[in-house]
Amino acid sequence: GAVVSQHPSRVICKSGTSVKIECRSLDFQATTMFWYRQFPKQSLMLMATSNEGSKATYEQGVEKDKFLINHASLTLSTLTVTSAHPEDSSFYICSVLAGYSYEQYFGPGTRLTVT
Amino acid sequence: QQQVKQSPQSLIVQKGGISIINCAYENTAFDYFPWYQQFPGKGPALLIAIRPDVSEKKEGRFTISFNKSAKQFSLHIMDSQPGDSATYFCAASNIGYSTLTFGKGTMLLVSP
């Protein structure tokens, strides 16, 4: 399977500030990456699909101006939570689509806490 | 039509027993059915997956059974171990579109 990393693993920020989360595909070039958020004891909710070199496709109800996604290279996608509020506190997880198959491999997740 | 219904919500199994988790889907266009295992504070890990051209797939202690006519698939964990205690998610997708639709998850506890 693919190896995916995320940075940071945990971040605490103050309300109103912005925070960037990085997702890296370490062992292959990923043209497609996904961003999910997960609340405690709940399932994964797809936020957006990120394709290298093009604009991300956001799921219904996800604010594109609040959750900025950049997929500038085949190994890196970033999610920036702008003007964060306490309700944005969540577990953010990225995944990569293995181009040689259709399997998705997930990163370890980033715990965001907004105070 | 995009839902994947997963049951049970939680499950307690004794060590050495068989854990069974079931999922049902509605969208007949789905043609890829993976299972993910997630430990607290970690990202989901792909456990095993099946395509609808086979009715069963086995990898070690993990088996997926697939019933296309009933639109159901299940995960069986044989000889369950305390280390298997985790949350399990079924999912489904149409590989042409790649986005996964997840079930709500099953929290498995294997008692020693």
Image (tube, helix red, strand yellow):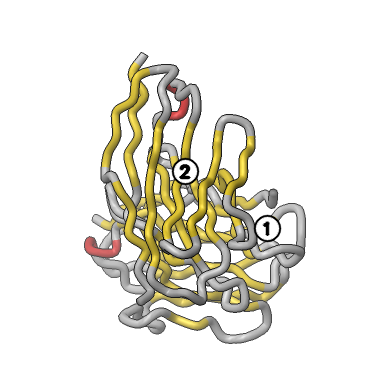
Q: Which mark is residue A91?
A: none
Depth check: A42 or A69 in front? A42
Q: Is residue A105 above or below residue B69?
A: above
Identified by mark 1, the residue type is Ser
Position of residue B67 measured from the top left corner of the image (x, y, whole percent): 48, 57
Q: Residue at x 57, y 48 (%)?
A: B46
Mark pair 2, 1: CA separation: 28 Å
Q: Position of residue A115 (x, y in %)?
A: 24, 55
User: Above or below — where is B4 with respect to A72?
Assistant: above
Query: Where is mark 1, residue-wise?
Result: A25
Residue drawn where x is 55% and y is 36% of the image: B62
In the image, residue A57 lies at what x, y percent? Answer: 50, 83
Which residue is disc 2 drawn over? B75
Q: Residues within 10 Å of mark 1 (few under 14, many from 20)?
A: many
Local SS, label 1: strand
* Furthest residue in direction top, as rendered: B112
Amino acid tagged 2: Leu
Q: Nearer the viewer, residue A28 or B7?
A: B7
For residue B82, side relative to residue B35 (left or right): left
Q: Nearer the viewer, residue B58 or A58?
A: B58
Q: Label 1 marks which chain's residue? A: A
* Tags 2 and 1 both on a single chain: no
- Estimate the x, y position of residue B66 in percent, counting from the top left: 51, 53
Q: Residue at x 38, y 48 (%)?
A: B22
Q: Are marks 2 and 1 in contact (CB under 8 Å)?
A: no
The image quadrant of residue B109 is top left
Foreground tag (2 vs 1): 2
